[in-house]
Amino acid sequence: MSTESPTAALSDLGVSIWLDDLSRERIASGGLQKLISERNVVGVTTNPTIFASALAKGEAYDAAVGALAKAGAAVTDAVFEITTDDVAAACDIFRPIYDATAGFDGRVSIEVEPGLAHDAAGTIAQAKQLWEKVDRENALIKIPATVEGLEAIAATIGAGISVNVTLIFSLERHREVINAYLTGLETAKAAGIDISTIHSVASFFVSRVDTEIDKRLDAIGTDEAKALKSKAGIANARLAYEVYEQAFASERAKVLLAAGANKQRPLWASTGVKDPSLPDTLYVTELAVADTVNTMPEKTLEATFDHGVIEGDQVTGSYAEANATLDALAALGISYDEVTALLEKEGVEKFIVSWNELLDTVSAALEAAK
C-alpha cells in the first residue's frame, strides 16, 4: 500500500495544486511556505473576495495602511499598492518552483478590477499596469471570460503577458477563450516576442454549475431530476477537458506549439463543495487528470490531504457519459445556455460587490490611521 499522501499522488498524476487564498499574514508567518513543503502546493490564485477577507481581519496590514494614509494615498491607489505587494512577495516564495517547472507552476494570479469586465480597453490597460507593478515573470493576470474580456485576453497575451482567464462556465466560451489565447500567441510571435515565455490557464468553474442546476432539479422534483443532482458540474468540466484536447491537436495550435508555445491548461476553479451532503473532495478526485490545475480553498486542500482517494485519470474516456448527463438535463427543460450565461453575469456581479467591500475596508483603515 502506498504511503504517498493524496496531494502527492495528485501531483504525480500531473495535477498542479494551487491554493485559492493569499494574505500578508500567510506570507509573513511562513504558512504559505509550509503548504508548499507539506501539501504539494505549487501556486496561488487571488480575487477581490480573498483580498477583502484578508484585509478585514488581523493586523498584518496596519503598517502598510498607516504609511499609505500618511502619504495621503487615495483608496484605489492604496488597494493597488497593497495587493500588488502581496502578489510580488508570494511570487518570490514560489520562484524556485517556477524555475524548476519551466514556468508552468510557481504562479501567483492577480485580477483586474471586476468593474472592467465589460471594458476591453480598460482591462488591457490595467493588465499591463499590474504586470509592470508586480514585476515578476511568474505572475498571472486574471481577466474574466466575458465577450469583452476575449478581446482583452488576445491583446494581453499578444503583448507577452501571461494570463489566467477566469469565470468560464460554458464549453462554447471555453473554445472562444482558447481561440483568444492562440490569436494572442500569433500576435506575439509576429512581433518577435519569445512565445515560450507566455503561459496561460483557463479557469473553468465547477461547483457553481451544480448549485444553480441542482436548484432547478429540486424545483422539478421528480425521481429522474433527483438522480441528476450534483452531476452537471463534473460533466461540464470533463467536456471542457475534451475541448482542450481537441483545440491543441488542431493544425493551428500545432504550428504555435512547434514554435515553442505552451498549451493553455484547464484550471478547475470553484472546487469547494457547496452542498454538505456531498463528499468534500468531490471536485478534486472526480476531475483528476494530467495537464490541469486544481485551485483549492484551504479547507478543500486539507480534506484532500487527509482523506482524498486518488484513483488515476477520471476524465479522459468519460465524455460520452458527460454528454449524456447534459442531454438528460436538457430533456428536463434545463437550459445549459441560460444557466451558464446567468452564472457569468452573477460571477462578475459578486466580484464587484467584493471589490466594493475591499475599497470600503481600506477606506476605513486609511481614515483610522490618519
Image: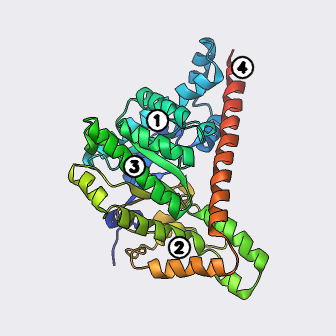
Query: Disc 4 marks which amino acid?
Result: Glu
Residue 12 visible somewhere in the drawing:
yes
**Secondary structure beneath disc 1?**
helix
List the single residue furthest toward the bottom.
223
**Secondary structure beneath disc 4?**
helix
Q: Nearer the viewer, residue 192 or 43?
A: 192
Gap between marks 1 and 3, in whole Å? Answer: 23 Å
Q: Which of 251 and 74 is in front in this view?
A: 251
For residue 181, which numbered disc appears in the image? 3
For residue 235, which numbered disc appears in the image? 2
Gap between marks 3 and 2, in whole Å? Answer: 24 Å
Gap between marks 2 and 1, in whole Å? Answer: 33 Å
Image quadrant assignment for residue 363: top right
Query: Disc 3 marks which amino acid?
Result: Tyr
Q: Which of 231 and 263 is in front in this view?
A: 263
Query: Disc 2 marks which amino acid?
Result: Ala
Q: In terms of sequence position, does the residue under pointer 2 or pointer 1 come before the other?
A: 1
Gap between marks 3 and 4, in whole Å? Answer: 42 Å
Q: Name the residue under label 4.
A: 367
Q: Horizontally, is 35 left or right of 121 in the view?
A: left
